[in-house]
Image: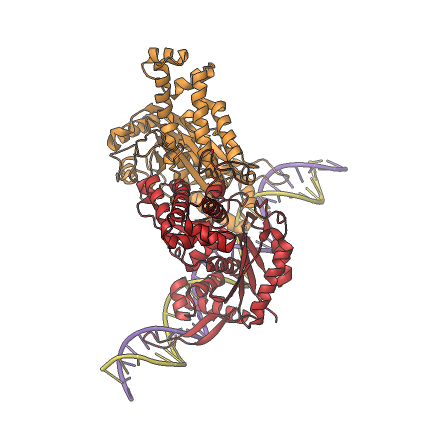
Chain colours: A orange, B red, C purple, D yellow
DNA sequence: CTACTTTTTCCACTCACAGGACAAAGACGC
DNA sequence: GCGTCTTTGTCCTGTGAGTGGAAAAAGTAG
């Protein structure tokens, strides 16, 4: 099927498209209330948008005391693809133009198999979503990868955990394969955008989004915009020193945060504890599964296992200390904690909060919420859809 | 004298004023090359600026191969006041509209004497500059204070080292006294703006400006704009934990960077070393002066004193470790080191560089210059002038 | 002095946009 | 059922911003 390739012709149209995306169907009159344009001008722009088929008429709105207004909505056939490539699994979801998830698939996968293998799988998953009747095609896709990205070109640069991806033209290649515009970003930035669009960060201009998964990263949002740094590696906090002369890290240093707390570190510590018979609970799980992961630790902690709780608490303390420093430096209005380990829940959050509130000055922490992300694995894919829609809903 | 209170009427005029400020006198034709406006439109806007007397005609430019163009420059009678209030001294300078310093006074002063006493002194210094014929009046003033500021209102909030200033309406009060528009900001942000305008950071969009004086702070520039955080305390890195269970700090915690390295900490450590007779050089200075300051340590280090060099090196290491974390997080394009301790020079810089290059990932440090500020004490006052001129040279 | 450049001014034309007038469509009171 | 009021949508004209061409003004180069 031929997809709509139209783009807004000017900033007014872009503005209207974003209002419709974020606020859902709207009457022409309601739109007029929000955009500060004359009725004539608004009518012209809406008519032009209708011509491009980016938006469609959608019946009559309820009366507000007089003549009923015609409803306008984004074309219900528009479809965005959100792809969140993690270290050990990949999420693919289809959304409509309002960025509501229509279908979502998660599959385990090893990012180290390289871009070709991974994208084969991603394309298969996208095809599956298409086959289930959720989409006839995609109008754009937003991809998150677990490493730094040269954003304008959509190319990973020197990603530590994904050798073989360095310099691979992700944007270019996927755009070819999918036949639609593609944008690529760090997975943490996508999560931040997701929580900003549909999660806990809806009303905050400056916030941090800490993702604790296989590694640790941090999305930085300044004035509502993701900040990516000079080389695209901003937010790479996994290798900040958390423990002087601490554990050796894959990066060559010692004491990196990621070496002391992350999905991988937690699994390793739990296995160690189980082998040393410090915890019957963990030992049992190790025996029955063969390996331990962060999920097992979460379950053990939920069952009240002291060793598991200690591991989480200590990790939370380390993470909290680092975040305390970032809070002093960045003075955010909100800190969101997300990623695979959110299953660790309240124990983790409490440890982090304690450290941050203790380690930063009152002016920075006084009114600083530190909360778990509320979208879970959907944050990344929604962020992806948001990324590409921001791109498409901007003047050509 | 009646000052010019005119403001640019639109963004084009604002653009032109900033071009003239940053590029000095310019011919109409040269301006046309830079602003992407039609010749007719440009002529209209320039004429209007001439009417407001914000800019004046200034003879003929050199020929570029044909008819000579008329030169345009900012009104040479415009004067900005830059005020940099430090913990122990205050800098006041007059600049012209191109932000060139015409006169600069520094006086010792204790910020803890409170806003009334300090501003009395500042006003006296401004009067002195006026009396010396450098200015007939001021068209605007930019003030830097050593603590967090609620920027829009220009009011210090909960400043640790300046009790008595909390909530004092600095902007309002000084605007009254000086009879001109005033903007107030953290002194570190002013330094960053100064180095950005006329110093080492001229071409960099995202950078950090670490000021090591009585305390330690960090100016954050994102996309060419100073980032101040949610409550105005962004960049307050003096109380990031640098040493676990380290020295007690005035803030109530232990191991804060500021407790281990800053002008105050350095003076204290040097005095200790002198009293313990670890260094003949420092002991001699202590005896002759009665007290020791960072300047003495710098002098001793320059004379090759091992103890002084050790103190500087260790402080540089601590600072470097913290900066390494910030570099990982923020991925700046440049790090500027400035403030009172720049006298410590190369030894300090070398220590910081070592830690940053060792402690951050190559992608972030690969092409990251770490340099001393090149403006010294002028950075703050130029930054102040820049602050107010940015405000005045924006559409009303 | 002539030919060519560059700068400046002048002018006609386009275009975006505002805002008023009016028609269409519904709510509401009687 | 009917007139009045409110809201919405359309049409039309006026205004002001801005563009681009033509020509005059003021140079340079030979």
Q: Give the camera-side residue of A89 and D13.
A: A89
Which residue is at a point 42% across and 25% down the rendered structure image?
A341
Where in the figure is residue A134, as x and y percent of width and height? 38, 27
Where in the figure is residue B224, as x and y percent of width and height? 43, 52
Quadrant of the rendered image containing residue A100: top left
Horizontal arrangement in the rendering, residue B73 relative to residue B7 (left or right): left
Question: Which of the image's four quarters has the C terminus of chain B?
Answer: bottom right
Horizontal arrangement in the rendering, residue B155 relative to residue C4 (left or right): right
Quadrant of the rendered image containing residue A221: top left
Which residue is at a point 50% across and 44% down the rendered structure image?
B236
Q: Give the camera-side residue of B333 and A96.
A: B333
Looking at the image, residue A283 lies above or below residue A149: above
Where in the figure is residue A130, as x and y percent of width and height? 34, 28
Q: Give the camera-side residue of B213 and A352.
A: B213
Q: Is residue A204 visible?
A: yes
Looking at the image, residue B206 lies above or below residue A195: below
User: Total marks drawn?
Assistant: 0
Q: Is residue A79 visible?
A: no
Question: Which of the image's four quarters has the N terminus of chain B?
Answer: bottom right
Which residue is at a point 40% across and 19% down the rendered structure image?
A295
Where in the figure is residue A333, as x and y percent of width and height? 52, 39
């Amino acid at each position: 099927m031929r997809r709509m390739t139209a783009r807004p012709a000017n900033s007014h149209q872009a503005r209207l498209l974003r209002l419709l995306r974020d606020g859902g169907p709207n009457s022409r009159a309601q739109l007029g209330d929000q955009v500060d344009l004359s009725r004539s001008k608004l009518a012209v722009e809406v008519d032009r948008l209708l011509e491009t088929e980016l938006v469609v008429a959608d019946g009559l709105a309820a009366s507000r005391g007089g003549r009923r207004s015609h409803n306008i909505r984004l074309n219900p056939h528009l479809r965005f693809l959100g792809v969140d490539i993690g270290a050990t699994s990949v999420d693919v979801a289809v959304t409509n133009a309002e960025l509501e998830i229509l279908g979502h698939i998660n599959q385990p996968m090893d990012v180290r198999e390289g871009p070709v293998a991974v994208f084969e799988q991603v394309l298969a998953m996208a095809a599956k979503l298409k086959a289930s009747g959720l989409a006839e095609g995609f109008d754009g896709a937003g991809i998150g990868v677990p490493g730094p990205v040269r954003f304008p070109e959509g190319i990973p640069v020197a990603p530590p955990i994904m050798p073989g991806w360095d310099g691979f033209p992700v944007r270019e290649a996927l755009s070819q394969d999918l036949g639609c515009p593609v944008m690529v970003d760090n997975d943490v930035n996508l999560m931040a955008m997701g929580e900003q669009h549909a999660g806990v960060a809806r009303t905050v201009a400056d916030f941090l989004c800490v993702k604790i998964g296989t590694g640790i990263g941090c999305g930085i949002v300044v004035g509502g915009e993701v900040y990516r740094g000079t080389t695209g590696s901003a937010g790479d906090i996994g290798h900040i020193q958390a423990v002087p002369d601490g554990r050796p890290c894959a990066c060559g240093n010692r004491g990196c945060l990621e070496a002391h707390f992350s999905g991988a570190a937690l699994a390793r510590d739990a296995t160690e504890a189980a082998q040393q018979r410090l915890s019957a609970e963990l030992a049992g799980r190790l025996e029955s599964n063969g390996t331990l992961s962060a999920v097992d630790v979460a379950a053990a902690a939920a069952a009240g296992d002291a060793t598991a709780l200690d591991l989480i608490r200590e990790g939370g303390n380390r993470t909290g200390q680092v975040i305390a420093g970032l809070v002093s430096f960045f003075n955010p209005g909100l800190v969101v904690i997300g990623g695979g380990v959110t299953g660790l829940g309240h124990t983790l959050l409490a440890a982090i909060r304690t450290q941050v509130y203790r380690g930063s000055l009152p002016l920075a922490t006084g009114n600083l919420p530190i909360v778990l992300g509320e979208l879970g694995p959907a944050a990344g894919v929604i962020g992806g859809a948001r990324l590409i829609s921001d791109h498409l809903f901007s003047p050509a």
